Amino acid sequence: MDWLTDPWSFEFMQRALLAGIIVSVAAGMVGVFVVLRGLAFLGDAVAHTQLAGAAVALVLGGGAVLITLGAGVAAVMTALGVALLTLRGRLREDTAIGIMFAGFFALGVVLISRQRTFAIDLGSLLVGHILGASWTDLIVMAALAVVVTALVLSFLPELRFSAYDPEVAAVSGVPVGLMQVGLLVLIALATVVAFRLVGVILAVAILVTPAAAAVLLTRRFKLMMVTAILVGVLSTVLGLYASFHFDLAAGPSIVLTAVLLMVLSFVFGPHGLRETLPSLEFLLADIAEPPPPGWRRRARICWGACCLVGDASWGACCRVGDVCWGACCRVGDRFSLRGRAD
């Protein structure tokens, strides 16, 4: 029993637990959209660009609150910059994200390198310092989490409709462009909350991993959010236990725990590995079908020089429809050498 209760007798562990719960709420509300929309790279870029805002706050001699606010300004600027660069297809989204990511992150490193406490400050910003979270940090994080939660709940139907089918949403009168920009800003704010917990490097993991586990466990959207929050809280609790009893870094321990829970969700969840197994059976059934006319093979399934899967053959001799690829291909009574049989 002491093994379970000892960690929570320390005030810094209690503050760390509260910080983890706050981050789990903000990340769970937004992370589901990140996973469903495939915006993990954006979340990573926004998390890293916070380094520039935090660096400016450090140069100005600011404390924890000013560092968090600086990181938030940089994150929101990144989100708006990506939206502006991709407006009307001027640049691809991944290109705009890469530009903002590289520029802001490099600026942050340059600014911090000018400080005498470069190594200490940079290490704290990169991997976080959850065990050193103060009550002021918790208040700032909680305020940001409340803003994120309120905005998501207020515009949940529009955000969900735009995430699943933006074209139909636009026809239905939903301001898809505004919702997309708003979602980018929400991702930025959520990563700012996670920034104080695990730093810029691991913030995207807290944003994405619990949400990915939730997607593997349920298909109901609201239940995904609740599940993502619960997975985040459980990861925080187990990660802090591991950190306390085995003398491990707290932030990375929380992230590794979240990854482990996601792997378990993939292996045992109803929408993970179990859902893919029937498709393997269909694949084997297709392979076992009789060969099409004009093709001869001695074995039921052939691998090597000539391999037939369904109506297509792969290997040295390959047929897809009436087009032949490979060293030698036969369609009916005609042969072709690395070309097309006419």
Image (spheres, rainbow, N blue to C red):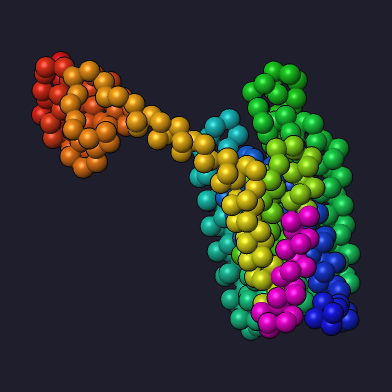
**Residue 49 occupies which quadrant of the picture?**
bottom right
Which residue is drawn at the image coordinates 89% and 64% (left, top)? 139
In front of the other: 10 or 201: 10
Nearest to the observer: residue 301 or residue 199: 301
Residue 47, visible in the rendered structure:
no
Number of dots carrying numbers: 0
Quadrant including the N terminus:
bottom right
On the picture, is 244 further left or further right than 288?
A: right
Residue 234 falls within the magenta-colored stretch: yes
Q: Residue at x 66, y 65 (%)?
A: 257
Residue 10 visible: yes
Q: Which residue occupies the foreground of this view, 260 or 43?
A: 260
Quadrant showing the C terminus: top left
* Residue at left offset 38%, top offset 29%: 286
On the picture, is 102 further left or further right than 29? left
Residue 38, by quadrant, is top right
Q: Please state if 128 lies on the left or on the right of 19 as rendered.
A: left
Picture coordinates of residue 259 (x, y %)? 62, 60
**In the image: residue 50, left or right of residue 320:** right
Please say if 1 is above or below 81.
Answer: below
What is the x, y in percent for residue 8?
Answer: 86, 77
Q: Is residue 318 above or below residue 40?
A: above
Q: Is residue 173 magenta?
A: no
User: What span is in magenta?
Assistant: 230-248
Residue 308: which quarter of the image? top left
| Residue 64 position in % (x across, y down) | 80, 71
Q: Nearer the viewer, residue 236 or 46?
A: 236
- Residue 165 image offset from top left, x and y in percent: 65, 27
Q: Residue at x 65, y 43 (%)?
A: 270
Task: Give the dominant element type of the magenta stretch: helix, strand or loop.
Answer: helix
